[in-house]
Image: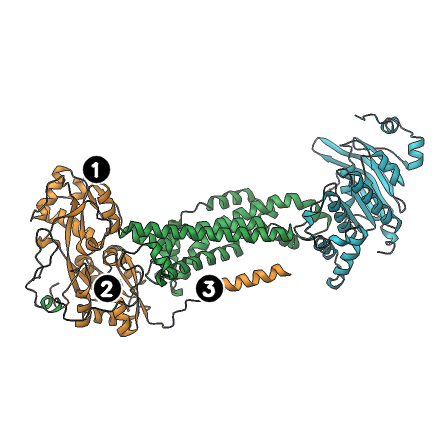
Amino acid sequence: MINRRMVMVAAAIVFATFTAPVHAQDKTIVVSSTTSTQDSGLFGYILPLFKQKTGIEVKVVAQGTGQALDTGRRGDADVVFVHAKSAEVKFLAEGEGVKRYPVMYNDFVLIGPKSDPAGIKGMKDVAGAFRTIKEKQAPFISRGDRSGTHLAELALWNKDTGIDIEKEKGSWYKSIGQGMGAALNIAGASNAYVLSDRGTWLSFKNKGDLQILVEGDKRLFNQYGVMLVNPSKHPNVKKDLGQAFIDWLISPEGQKAIAGYKINGEQLFYPNANDNNA
Amino acid sequence: MFYFPTLTETGLNAQSSPDPLAEELRGGDFRPAPQINPGYPMTGDVSALHLVLTGDPGLFAIVRLSLQVSLSAVLFAALVGVPAGALLALTRFPGREVVIVILNALMGLPPVVVGLAIFLLLSRSGPLGSWGLLFTPKAMVIAQTVLVAPIIAALARQTIEDLWAEYRDELAAMDIGPARRVVTLIWDARFSLVTALLAGFGRAAAEVGAIIIVGGNIDGFTRTMTTAIALETSKGDLPLAIGLGMVLIFIVILINALAWGIRHAGERYAG
Amino acid sequence: MSMRAPASDLPLVLAEVRIVDGEVTILDRITLTITAGPPTILIGPNGSGKTTLLRAAMGLVPLTSGRITWGGREATTPGRCAIMFQRSTMLRRTAAANVRYALAAANVPRAKRKERAAELLALVGLGELGDRPARRLSGGEQQRLALARALARDPTVLFLDEPTASLDPYATKAIEDIVRAVSARGVKVVMSTHDLGEAKRLAGDVVLLHRGRLIEAAPAAEFFATPHTGEARKFIAGELLV
């Protein structure tokens, strides 16, 4: 019957297209990293270079730092590449990672609307700026997602400014639980302040009225580290390929590549694998 | 001790720092890295229309993946859902009404919840971890099949139950047994069932919550139209995101037109 | 067409058949014997139970009490019978495919079906229309197709439930001609109708039903010339039986 044949043909087409993209090589690793790193566009730049050199395809799953480390804990990634040293050290202490390598750094910047309702533009002291924002009850967007940026923001409140933000926040403080791009979108739309990493900020395309208001404070330093997920705990981890990636990142070639990534001529990340204290 | 670039008040020019390594690396004494298929999309000064007109391979790869995932999910969901719906329509058992209510309710399963459930199942530390399916297109197909199957089953049940009321006497008069009855009703209901499949496809093609969780939105591997739109939005490239959205809508309209054409031709042939 | 059906299916005997649905008595102790021969025509007002009687004989409706026997056998499985309804449902396929479907259901081997379908279509005058989608046939043509489907079962007894009620005179004549032809070949026809004229044209035996009870049963000539019951007289005279 014609109709039965047509159904067979259709099924064959679907099956063929579904199985079509079979990756020729099996050399792939999964790297869980952060949305800020992804949104900055760094991976789109350096990963093809790595693949060209080693033939290894890197699949990046981008989440908040907390989520990225959890993905490592579950064994769903081979390598984690995040920017929250305290969380990374804890990861190591739990036996989830093999060794932490510093890779690169950039800085955070305090973004706000041109109108600057809290009047903090140009301040050199980020803690003071935070305190002013709170006193003036100016709207502030927090990532709220246990990301590296979020943890840095919390440290600035709790440690550096001495404000227990969980207790003392008001309706001016909006915790959104999303990535950096979303936070910037919301800050732009509601004329609010937000702490961002410079990389995401530079590559963000919806800046609108927002601009950098405070920068350069030492406490805004943002270090990135990379770790191999512990293969003893998760036997499926591709430890050779993963270590190859780490080795490349900290090699002069990889470090050059990182430094080479620029937007409008401006460098986003500064390699510092040689710095043992990073 | 760390080195930190000091920045001017406007913050746009990186000045030299005391970091010797940075000194060496900056200054561009190496050739700029070649842009080898940088992954889509690299810079956003490109509109979606431009990508379509130049036949950008990145865009077409994303479209192809979206269609593969959603169409496969609809196919598997139909293979499960149509017979299940038909059986439910034609059999009587205690608690049948409850099953129907639950099935109808499952049409409204939140995609993000399904995504989370499948994620926990497929994670390496989950029960099905050894299959290694997390963050692959197959996981996305699984999640969407789970989402779409109740829709197809519920609509199939309704369609076939209505048709059964119409056909009951004739089929009984011809002494048609239960197995043949199911096949006959499914075949005779085929045009209405196509509509059910389209409803399922619409759901699958439009959702992002499930596939972004189980797929990971990996560039060049599990990035579909909807997850790409989510990404571009979060990168602030709203014009590109909207452009991609329109491409997606256009494709969905195309699929619906195709289905209409098939149905039309089929009805002319078979009444 | 078929040879005369095995005599063992007839007579079809309904003995004290009662069918009750809740409060309503649809058939009230019907006792009726149907033997081979010219058509038996059931007449009576709407709601008199004609349709239910046919369906019960066909085995589609369970009895509340009473028995139906085919050639002396209990009717757990009815004899070779087929039924055609007032409005027939066509399957979504061609006319010929509809007939082939019925043949398949009657366990006719696949190799023979195409040929048999063509024969049956020719018998009902649809020989040219085999490839047309069944749903696109006219009302009269669909009823003839339904007749072909019923005959595909090679029945001993053919039940027809007001088959011409919704048809124009031309289509009605076509159906009646087929019924006569089929009856002449030895199939026992049991048919209900609204139309006294049709009863006169086709019967055999006439059975009058009213409110689920069998009022009178007699050969046609006798029934119309000398009705015995008051209801029969009124009905023949065209009065409303309430």
Q: CA distance from mark 1 to mark 3?
A: 51 Å
Q: Secondary structure at mark 3?
A: helix
Residue B184 is situated, as x and y percent measured from the top left of the image, at 64, 53
Query: Looking at numbered disc 1 in the image, what kind of residue is underneath it?
Result: Ser
Q: Chain of mark 3?
A: A
Residue B1 is situated, as x and y percent measured from the top left of the image, at 7, 62
Q: Colour of chain A?
A: orange
Task: Name the residue that disc number 2 marks.
Answer: A95
Badges 2 and 3, same chain: yes
Cβ atoms under marks 1 and 3 closer than 8 Å: no
Task: Name the residue that disc number 3 marks.
Answer: A17
Query: Looking at numbered disc 3 in the image, what kind of residue is underneath it?
Result: Thr
- Identify the chain drawn in cyan: C
Q: Nearer the viewer, mark 1 or mark 2?
A: 1
In the rendered image, is residue B126 in sight? no
Residue placed at 30% from the left, 56% from the top? B46
Tell which circle, 1 or 3, labels the residue nearer the N-terminal end: 3
Tell which circle, 2 or 3, labels the residue nearer the N-terminal end: 3
Task: Name the residue that disc number 1 marks.
Answer: A171
